Amino acid sequence: MTMTVPTNLSRRSFLSASLGSSALILGSTALFAEETGIVPTMIRAASQANIEVHPLRRNISVLEGSGGNIAVLTGNDGKLVIDAGFTVSKPRIESALDSLSMDPITRLINTHWHVDHTDGNAWLNAAGGAITAHENTRKHLSTSTRVEGWSYTFPPVLPEALPTTVFADEKHLHQNNTTIELKYYGPAHTDSDISVVFDEADVVHVGDTWWNGFYPFIDYSTGGSIAGMIRATKRNLSVVSDETIIVPGHGPVGNKAGLSEYYDMLVAIRSNVSTLKKQGKSLKETIAAKPTAAYDAKWGQFLMTPAIFTELVYSGV
Ligand SMILES: [Zn+2]
């Protein structure tokens, strides 16, 4: 069952509505400016988007439409929510949560510190969700943090938006007759990424280590790298089976076959870009050589364009 609240904003209309043709023509400089950049674009999209509800398995569902994918575990112990979306989506996220069950919200987990996964922390915490995250998520949210790739500096969040339970490597939780395993990746998309496994249901939320169907953003400013993304994806592949339901940070819920294809894409593009850089090519020359060409039709149609993704990989090889 897929339940849709208000009108849908498809990926394509998202692009044309929010970026506009001028931003697309001007390329990355315009994309990364404060007003037309990635962050305001994501907020504008969330302010217009429906929240789609996708039931997965057992008592686990995904809410899609406000920044990163939000997973929800329902039951008598209260709802456990993974990632918080953008605050502008609060009324629509509330309706979506109510449509699943009337259990109160008792816990919120952040997969990493980025705004599209933590902006709603304050209201979800006020609603009852005690926040758990990796220690670096708390660190980045506590202080002013610059993301060069977004040309954006985030001020410290309100105290009520900070995780109150943090961990370094692993943490196990029990809620609603479910074992929930949180595990740090090490530096990957940032230096704060964790996976969240629901054991009995065989469902895993891998945060922004996987963008299903899109080139991923990699945040070098807070410890991310192409090597870290590949390492994290290798780990994801090693812990899932063909039956595992995999919730990516962005894009539709997927499976091992889709994740394998993503892995192959990351490895091939890293190799192509690395070869060009070793030949002494500048970033501009490397982008002009189109090292992502074989993958652009499938992966290059969203926020991270072929040129932007090439630049992200180039920074790390
Ligand atoms: Zn992210």
Image (cartoon, rainbow, N blue to C red):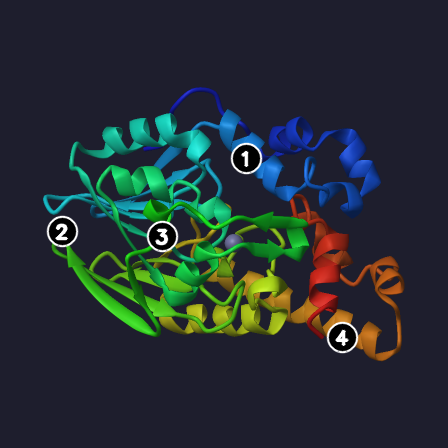
Q: Of label 2 and label 4, which has the lower sequence position?
A: 2
Amino acid type at mark 4:
Ser
Observer-nearest of 23 and 146: 146
Query: Disc count in the image?
Result: 4
Q: CA distance from mark 2 to mark 4?
A: 47 Å
Look at mark 3 in the image and give the residue it sits on. Answer: 162
State the SS at label 4.
helix
* 64 left or right, relative to 72: right
Q: CA distance from mark 3 to mark 1?
A: 20 Å
Residue 240: % across, % down:
37, 67
Residue 245: % across, % down:
35, 55
Labels 2 and 4 touching (C-beta < 8 A): no
Q: CA distance from mark 4 to mark 3?
A: 38 Å
State the SS at label 3.
loop
* Residue 252 seen from this side: no
Q: Of label 2 and label 3, which has the lower sequence position?
A: 3
State the SS at label 2.
loop
Q: Of label 3 and label 1, which has the lower sequence position?
A: 1
Dividing the picture into quarters, in which one does residue 42 lie? top right
Label 1 CB, ligand 1: below 8 Å?
Answer: no
Look at mark 2 in the image and give the residue it sits on. Answer: 176
Q: Nearer the viewer, mark 3 or mark 1?
A: 3
Residue 172: % across, % down:
22, 67
Look at mark 4 in the image and give the residue it sits on. Answer: 274
Q: Is residue 35 above or below residue 302?
A: above
Q: CA distance from mark 4 to mark 1?
A: 34 Å
Observer-nearest of 190 and 160: 160
Number of other residues with Cα within 10 Å of mark 4, as a class: few under 14, some 14 to 19, many 20 or more: many
Amino acid type at mark 3:
Leu
Number of other residues with Cα within 10 Å of mark 2, as a class: few under 14, some 14 to 19, many 20 or more: some
Amino acid type at mark 2:
Asn
